Image (cartoon, grey):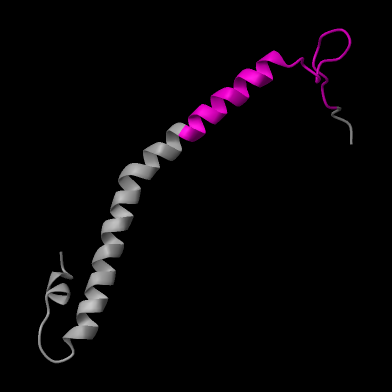
Amino acid sequence: MGVAPLVVSTGAGAEMRHAMGVAVFAGMLGVTLFGLFLTPVFYVLLRTLAARRGQRSEDAPDRDLDLDGTLPVPSTQH
């Protein structure tokens, strides 16, 4: 609320201070609203997409398995 005097300013040069105060106040208000509403929306959206992707990969066959059903092990020799 520190920009409130800029928003309600009067006198010499008040037009410039008023415009700057309104821009700063609107920016702070907008960022706060975006943070409160869009952060949870993006979280749920990404969680839903990750869950769908996880379900698809469970249905897909395992391509990393060898013919006998074991996972390949990297060689320790250089």
**Which quadrant of the rendered structure holds the N terminus?**
bottom left
For the record, the magenta segment spans 45-74
Q: Relative to the observer, which residue lies in front, 39 or 23? A: 23
Query: For residue 58: magenta?
Result: yes
State the residue lying farthest toward the front: 15
* Left or right, 16 with reference to 47: left
State the residue lying farthest toward the bottom: 12
Q: Residue at x 82, y 9 (%)?
A: 69
**Which quadrant of the rendered structure holds the C terminus?**
top right
Percent across and percent down for residue 24 are 27, 69
Percent across and percent down for residue 33 are 29, 50
Q: Residue at x 80, y 16 (%)?
A: 71
Q: Relative to the observer, which residue lies in front, 47 or 29? A: 29
Query: For residue 48: magenta?
Result: yes
* Left or right, 33 with reference to 68: left
Percent across and percent down for residue 5 are 12, 74
* Left or right, 74 with reference to 35: right
Task: Say if 8 sits above or below 77 in the image.
Answer: below
Q: Residue at x 33, y 43 (%)?
A: 37
Percent across and percent down for residue 59 are 69, 14
